[in-house]
Amino acid sequence: MENWFLIALIAPILWSIVNHIDKHILSRYQEGQGVNAILIFSSLSSVVILPFVIFFHHSQIFSVHFIDFLSLIIVGFISATAFYFYLKAMNIEEASTVVPLFQLVPIFGYFLSYFILGESLSITQVLFSLVILSGIFMISLEIDIDNKITLKKEVLFLIAVSSFLFALHDTLFKKIAVVDSFWIAVFWQYVGLTLFGVILLTFFKKSRQDFVFMVGNAQANVLSLNALSEILYIIGNLANNFATLLAPVAIVLVVSSYQPLFVFIGGIFFTLFFPKFMVEKISTKHFFHKLISIFIIIIGSVFLYTSSLH
């Protein structure tokens, strides 16, 4: 087993832990309250990376063209908005159902890159996108106590919007970053994220009240979990980026597509051993429903990413 694989594997494992932490924090608050608080906390946390970029790349930061600068600020806003819809979905559904739906991101990404970047889209990629969509449709079905099957329309809509915005973010970021320095693009994107949090905190009373409530009334462990979540997410991103230096991007993305499986395993672990932290449905029918759906999604994702190597 090569080093790049172990490094790439760090990302989906850490991101799966972040998903469960987000779900736990959201469960501690009233409807919607945690969404606004976490969104502001996460957006404002982006400021911590800015001094490091300034220190190492201060001579290049202001060399960016005005249109690219404005576009990157918008990219930061898009990222924050995508995160908002993710939190809304996590607020009403289990992590092991929400996270697999994010394999919509590469599907949207392939089509957006086709129209925005002029990248090619093969018949094979379209076919494997359909395989992923079939798995997403399966996991979007709710099986109630009477074995009645219904479609989780609200969750599917929220994640579809979030996935589209994340894919749009990635596509626009790539379009700008290939012209300007990678770190310049990262800097102004994170400025946009931070600005998004400042705007929410300053001009949206409900969001400000939710954030102040979380900071002022939350127990220390909730704030610590928030901080831990941000740290794990950043480390996961760094591991993922470093892995792309050691192996083809498409292969690294294959490893990242294992995240739904780690979330699924984590949900079972917490439900059995730490039910006070979080509980998911793990009855026999729910177990196999999620397991089969996730494997279909992963198989489709693996072939979708590897098809881009040819």
Image: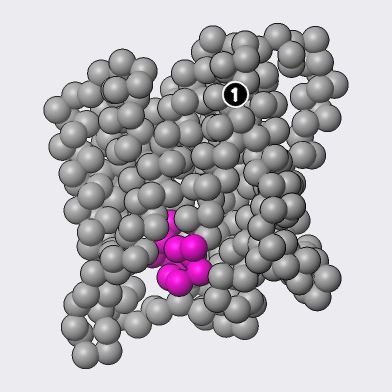
Q: Image point 17% across, 30% down: which residue? A: 124
Residue 24 visible from this viewpoint: no
Kindly identify which residue carries mark 1: 70
Q: Position of residue 98 (x, y in %)?
A: 41, 61
User: Which of the pair 178/281 is nearer the observer?
Assistant: 178
Q: Image point 76% across, 34% down: which residue? A: 49
Work out whether 289 lies above or below 11.
below
Badge 1: residue crowd in 10 Å (few <14, some 14–19, many ≥20):
some
User: Which of the pair 177/225 is nearer the observer?
Assistant: 177
Residue 301 falls in which quadrant of the image? Answer: top left
Q: Which residues are magenta?
A: 88-100
Residue 59 visible from this viewpoint: yes
Residue 305 falls in which quadrant of the image? Answer: top left
Q: Image point 26% across, 36% down: which residue? A: 303
Q: Position of residue 217 (x, y in %)?
A: 80, 75
Can you name the residue that lies furthest to the bottom here?
146
Q: Quadrant of the C terminus?
A: top left
